[in-house]
């Protein structure tokens, strides 16, 4: 994915393209990390790259199932323990989380292409962060929320990654995309 989302005349395609751009931000932050590095929590908070990828998988899966009930991809679960949801556990691999994230992205794009943007999505009840005075959102709202949520965590991933080894977003993107070196940008490469 290029640094900028290409223009789309179709609103749904534009929303999905912006969501995918933010997913790439999270994936790029994981570029070249070992499982141990992906588990590191180098900032004062408890966030790790692996944990952020894992959380993004679960969160996207949850919202898509909420928007289109019964759409959960085969074998997927949305059981979610908040405490471990942000942790890449010792028996989990970063590569498996990134593969799951790619699968979720493919699933989301397929499901959301078939849903009407104006379809109602019932607001869950029983949690203080969900409004009690709103009965339903729309599929459009869910896509915008996924963009917001993913972008928030892509930013977290940028900070965590920079704290691990100093790698920043543009050099990581350049490496992931295979950009040539320029006078102002050198693609990230693993330390030798």
Image (tube, helix red, strand yellow):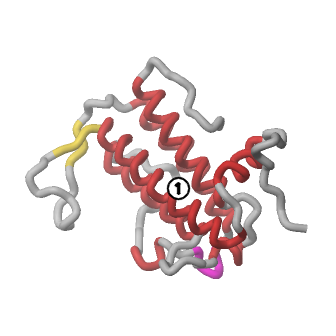
> Does the magenta run of residues contain 90?
yes
Q: Residue at x 30, y 40 (%)?
A: 141
Magenta residues, start to end: 88-92
Main SS of the magenta segment? loop
> Quadrant where the C terminus lies?
bottom right
Measuring 41% from the left and 54% from the top, which residue is drawn there?
Answer: 149
Residue at x 25%, y 43% (from the top left corner): 121
Q: Examine the structure image and report whether residue 44 is included in the region drawn in magenta.
A: no
Where, by quadrant of the figure, is residue 82 drawn? bottom left
Q: Closest to the observer: 50 or 168?
A: 168
Residue 54 image-quadrant placement: bottom right
119 sits left or right of 153 in the view: left
Q: Residues within 10 Å of mark 1 (few under 14, many from 20)?
A: many
Query: Percent from the top left, x then y, of residue 166?
Result: 70, 66
Residue 146, relative to residue 90: is it above or below?
Answer: above
- Helix, strand or loop under label 1: helix
Q: Nearer the viewer, residue 190 or 111?
A: 190
Q: Furthest-front residue in view? A: 183
Residue 1 % position (x, y): 65, 37
Front-lying residue, 128 or 104: 128
Q: Is residue 113 visible?
A: yes
Residue bearing the label numbered 1:
154
Residue 30, position as x, y percentages in the image? 67, 61
Q: Is residue 171 above or below residue 181?
A: below
Instruction: Please say whether residue 57 is visible from this viewpoint.
Output: no
């Amino acid at each position: 994915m290029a640094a900028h989302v290409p223009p789309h005349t179709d609103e749904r395609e534009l929303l999905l393209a912006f969501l995918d751009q933010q997913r790439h931000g999270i994936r790029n932050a994981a570029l070249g990390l070992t499982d141990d590095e992906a588990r590191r929590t180098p900032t004062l908070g408890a966030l790790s790259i692996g944990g952020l990828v894992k959380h993004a998988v679960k969160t996207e899966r949850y919202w898509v199932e909420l928007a289109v009930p019964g759409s959960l991809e085969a074998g997927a679960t949305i059981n979610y323990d908040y405490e471990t949801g942000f942790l890449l556990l010792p028996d989990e691999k970063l590569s498996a989380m990134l593969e799951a994230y790619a699968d979720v992205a493919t699933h989301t794009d397929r499901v959301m292409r078939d849903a009407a943007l104006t379809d109602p999505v019932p607001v869950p009840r029983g949690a203080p962060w969900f409004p009690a005075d709103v009965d339903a959102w729309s599929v459009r709202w869910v896509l915008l929320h996924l963009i917001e949520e993913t972008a928030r965590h892509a930013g977290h991933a940028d900070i965590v990654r920079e704290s691990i080894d100093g790698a920043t977003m543009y050099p990581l993107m350049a490496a992931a995309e295979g950009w040539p070196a320029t006078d102002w940008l050198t693609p990230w490469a693993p330390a030798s």
